[in-house]
Image (cartoon, helix red, strand yellow):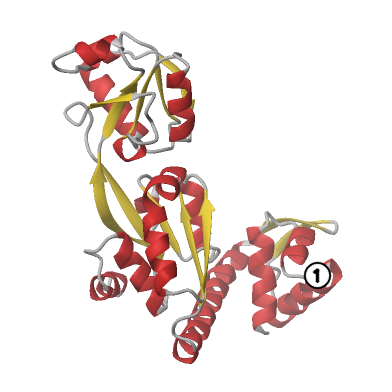
Amino acid sequence: MNLQQLRYFNEIVRRGLKISDAADALYTSQPNISKQIKQLEQELGIEIFVRNGKRVVAVTEPGKAILDIARRILHDTENLRQVGQEFHSQDSGPLTIATTHTQARYILPTVVKRFVGRYPKVKLGLHQGNPTQIAEQVLNGEADVAIATEGLTQYDGLVTLPCYEWHHCVVVPPKHPLLDETKLTLAKIAQYPIITYDSAFSGRGKINEAFESAGIEPSIALTAIDADVIKTYVELGLGIGILAEIAFVPERDRHLRMIWASHLFKPNTTRIAIRKNEYLRGYTYDFIELFAPQLTHSVVFEAMHVSP
């Protein structure tokens, strides 16, 4: 039994039981992976995969138990490698951030600029996706840190920490009737077609909750995962927009007007997530603190090492 066999086993499962895809991802051949998996099964004395002819169709029950152990071993092995890199080259290495469009577009640019200025030798990568995708990227080791508003707290394998709160706002074209209202209400908003986020993004649940609690059925004309798309269609006159206040930039959005709506929708909390028991490089702690100053090295370290 060796680490390569465990790595092959884990990758096959990650690739939806497609050995050819696992082989491509690991830069090896399908026959080699199949041979190594057979040797692993022979040494363990069990079958870890259910097969239909030559095709893998499922993981056996003992295989699932072995997969959990294999992933812990691979995780600890990666931590060992990170320790070595930390003491060999403290200011260089990879750092991958998985996040949503809103964070990548409106919050992270200033953080990234400061980080790159401090750590020019770090190879920084940004992966965008929905909350489920970015959480799974961290769990699978494809990313080091996840940043999102929804979903991250649902995963037992992640340590999540609150970063900041934000509210929704309403955006309208200039001279829109809502700009003349002394106090914005949900009923007045519901008089117009609404353009807002897809259900999995940027606090959409808080928007739905507000209307449901008020017993009002809004007319959702269009949904999108991207605040820029929402603003584009508001400019075209297809409706009014409800989006994150952080996504409205007066200097850039000169053809729109923003109306504060913090009294209508509950606040949202953006969180950062790291895989449990992960060894973080020093510059990763610094990136987190640049993003959320209250999350110092000691705060993050303590959160990651609290006994369950």
The image shows residue 80 at horizontal and vertical percentages of 49, 85
Q: Which quadrant holds the N terminus?
A: bottom right
Residue that appears at 30% across and 67% down: 289
Q: Which quadrant holds the C terminus?
A: bottom left
Secondary structure beneath label 1: helix
**Compared with residue 179, is residue 245 higher up or lower down, i.e. above or below?**
below
**Compared with residue 68, is residue 151 higher up or lower down, i.e. above or below?**
above
**Displayed quadrant of residue 305:** bottom left
**Compared with residue 33, is residue 254 higher up or lower down, i.e. above or below?**
above
Q: As shown in the figure, which amino acid type bears the numbered disc 1?
A: Ser
Label 1: how many residues lie within 10 Å, few (<14), some (14-19) or many (20+)?
Answer: some
The image shows residue 143 at horizontal and vertical percentages of 51, 63
Residue that appears at 33% across and 17% down: 174
Residue that appears at 41% across and 54% down: 109
The image shows residue 122 at horizontal and vertical percentages of 50, 74
**Compared with residue 185, is residue 307 higher up or lower down, i.e. above or below?**
below
Would residue 151 be visible to someone looking at this image?
yes
Q: Nearer the viewer, residue 159 or 71?
A: 159
252 left or right of 180 in image: right
**Residue tagged by mark 1?**
34
**Displayed quadrant of residue 210:** top left
Would residue 157 be visible to someone looking at this image?
no
